[in-house]
Amino acid sequence: MQKHLSAFIDAHPEGWGHADWLGLLAELESAGHDLSDSDAIGVELESERLAWELRRRAVPGLGPKRIDAVVSRFGNLWKLRQAAPEDLAAIKTIPGALAEQVVAAVR
């Protein structure tokens, strides 16, 4: 499923609407994925979008393990954009200066 989600995000870098979401669900269904919990799929899509955006911003010092930690803590781009640098620096592996850079990069 992750391959489908990543391709969907690549095709919609500025975000997506309801019709796009329904199209993704139809694509996933035709690929044989279980759609019984579309909310969980939405959460997974938003997490993947956050990771995608952090990789795209290429903030020096923010590698894959730190990106995973940020995604785990915030879950979606909207929550990260609302966060203060101190919220990000609360993650053990994110120093204060890096937290400021990340917050500035996503806003």
Image (tube, grey):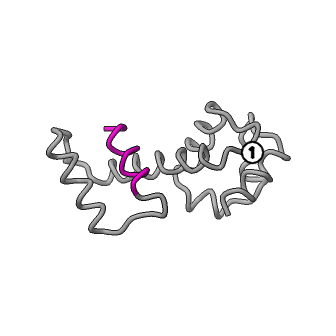
Q: Which percent across, then down, holds residue 77?
A: 55, 57
Residue at (65%, 49%) from the top-left corner?
A: 57
Residue 104, x across and y down, in percent: 75, 59
- The residue furthest right is 97
Compared to residue 104, the image places residue 61 above or below, namely: above
In the picture, measured across the screen, residue 1 lies left or right of residue 59, that is left
Residue at screen point 41% across, 58% down: 12
Quadrant of the image occupied by residue 71: top right
* Quarter of the C terminus within the rendering: bottom right
Q: Which residues are magenta?
A: 1-11
Of 10 and 71, the residue lying toward us: 10
The secondary element bearing badge 1 is classed as: loop
Task: Tell whether 79 sits left or right of 89.
Answer: left
Q: Which residue in the rendered view is the most extreme toward the top? A: 65
Check disc 1 and report the residue beneath it.
90
Q: How many marks?
A: 1
Residue 39 placement (x, y as % from top left):
32, 54
